[in-house]
Image (cartoon, rainbow, N blue to C red):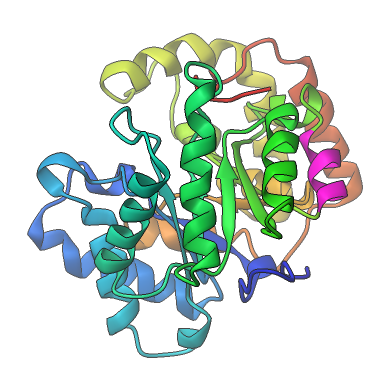
Amino acid sequence: METHPELSLPNMGCGTWSWGNQILWGYKESMDHQLQEVFNLCVSHGVTLFDTGDSYGTGRLNGRSELLLGKFSHEYQGIGQENICIATKLAAYPWRWTSQSMAIAGQASARRLGRKIDLVQMHWSTANYAPWLEGNLLDGLAYLYESGLVSGVGLSNYGPERLQWVYNRFKQRNIPISTLQVQYSLLSTYPFTQLGLKEVCDDLGIKLIAYSPLALGLLTGKFSQTGNLPPGIRGFLFKQLLPGIKPILGCLRIIADFRNKTMSQVAINWCMRKGTIPIPGAKNVEQAKDNIGALGWELSDAEVTELDQVANKVDKKMVQNIFQTK
């Protein structure tokens, strides 16, 4: 798979990784070594794109996700070291009103990472609640790019209409949009089937990043109605969805058994076959190894079609991000 011409993301087609807040909310000092092992394992197996955000690990942890990624990337010595690519997202917080506020946020992220940002992304659009604000925030991203403080610019949770608006705005300043990150999985096909984002991004030369490709873990096959469910809202959501997604889980299991793969690996590979860069999270080495097993092989056209048909027939879908625009 080709890398984006305006943004060097080495080994983009070989696998990518998410470094999200799911790792860091339960962070303890003793976890540093384990997380470094996860990072090292990923890079050594060709997983060189790590996605984070300035809102991951904020508050008491104060940008801990970016700090950890910066630390790990500097300490890693081995295969793929020169290809490490770190993408971060700047949140459209209510107190960020001006272009300068976004520029300052980007500079702070770079300091925490201890390196130039390879890809800076608008974490979400304000179109759904404060459309008048978005231009200022985008101008802040433009400043970071034009000043050479970041190598590329991307978006997150944008639909085709708002994407085209931003594309035209940036085009006037000769700023390419390298990537668009959306929630996408077998339980969240909305960006493709209803919004038609794939065709729009292909036309504009924008690469699609699929976050939550395992639907918060539902597609791993590790949860059941009668088994232990995650605590809190996540467990409540799983309880609502599990009865209706049995056909998808069954299809994943059949293909996984036939391929001698795990259900997670099949679900991730399906996202790759759809032309996206999936970014599953990994809390430990075991999860990282499982996700790495999605690389180096491909589902057949027939298997992809079978999964598509099952996904289209299932009524229950993952809840969409409230910031997702049209």
Q: Residue at x 49, y 34 (%)?
A: 124
Front one among 135 and 82: 135
Picture coordinates of residue 19, whole percent (x, y): 39, 54
> Would you say residue 200 sits in the magenta stretch?
yes
Q: Residue at x 53, y 81 (%)?
A: 83
Give the answer, above or below, for where 159 lies relative to 171.
above
Front one among 217 and 202: 202
Number of numbered discs overlaid on the protein picture: 0
Which stretch did the figure color magenta? 197-204
| Direction bottom: furthest residue | 78
Q: Quadrant of residue 38?
A: bottom left
Res. 250 in view = yes
Q: Residue at x 69, y 69 (%)?
A: 6
Picture coordinates of residue 11, whole percent (x, y): 64, 74
Q: Residue at x 72, y 66 (%)?
A: 4
Front one among 131 and 88: 131
Query: Is residue 281 left or right of 283 when viewed as pictured?
Result: right
Q: Quadrant of residue 315?
A: top right
> Would you say residue 310 sits in the magenta stretch?
no
Give the answer, above or below, for where 184 lies relative to 281.
above
Picture coordinates of residue 123, whole percent (x, y): 47, 40
Picture quarter with the N terminus: bottom right
Give the answer, above or below, for where 27 lies relative to 184.
below
Res. 276 in view = no
Picture quarter with the C terminus: top right
Query: Is residue 275 left or right of 170 when viewed as pictured?
Result: right
**Magenta residues, dominant SS class:** helix
Give the answer, above or below, for where 166 lies relative to 112.
above
Query: Is residue 12 left or right of 147 when viewed as pictured?
Result: right
Picture coordinates of residue 69, whole percent (x, y): 31, 66
